[in-house]
Image (cartoon, grey):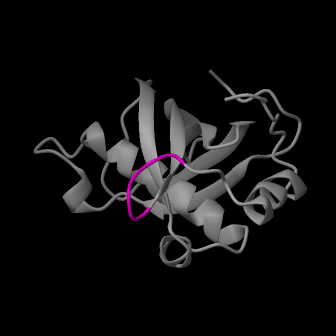
Amino acid sequence: MRAQNALEPFAHRCRVYYEDTDAGGVVYYVNYLKFMERARTERLRHLGFSQSQLAEDNLLFVVHSSEARYHAPARLDDALRVTAHVIELNRASLRFVQQVWREQDDTLLCEGQFLVAAVRADTFKPRAIPPQLRDAFAADGSGTQSIAGE
């Protein structure tokens, strides 16, 4: 499930806090999804778009489906690198491949795929991704491919 692209995918760096761990000091599995959500949000911010501004423009992104595979545990105080690579850009959705790496030893901890749908903030019905946002993903060199007729 690794992104097949010569370009380095966008990465967000974060640290594991006590609140992220279970009684054994290991990151609780669902928290990897939170780390990945934050990386997708920071990817948008990196492109010049904030989720709050998009909501004011009647656009929200919602996770339609997710898939995760866990390889190794992260622990308290680990520094993490979380990638967010768009592999598919459709009229009203994006497909991300994401990975969580431990910085210290460059170990892949978790990887996943997320289909994220664009919806109207007022009705939650699907809507097209605005051209300026589509163009920003394309200009960022993410290696996205456009699929017609979603």
The C terminus sits in image quarter: top right
Number of callouts: 0
Which residue appears farthest toward the left when viewing the image? 23
Is 93 situated above or below 4? below
Give x and y (percent) for residue 129: 66, 54
Residue 128 percent location from the top left of the image: 65, 50
- For the point 85% across and 51% down, which residue is it? 138
Task: Name the image quarter holding residue 13.
Answer: bottom right
- Which residue is at a point 36% across and 59% down the rendered structure image? 77
| Image quadrant in which the N terminus is located | top right
**Relative depth, front residue between 113 and 128:** 128
Position of 145 relative to 56 (above/below): above
- Whether residue 127 is in magenta: the answer is no
Q: Residue at x 63, y 71 (%)?
A: 45
Name the magenta segment's main secondary structure: loop
Q: Nearer the viewer, residue 77 or 48?
A: 48
Q: Residue at x 71, y 60 (%)?
A: 130
| Residue 54 on image: x %, y % | 55, 71
Q: Can the viewer see residue 85?
A: yes
Measured as percent of width and height from the top left, residue 134 is found at 77, 54
Q: Which residues are the magenta region?
A: 121-126
Would residue 103 be visible to someone looking at this image? no
- Give left or right: position of 16 versus 61: left
In the foreground, 12 or 37: 37
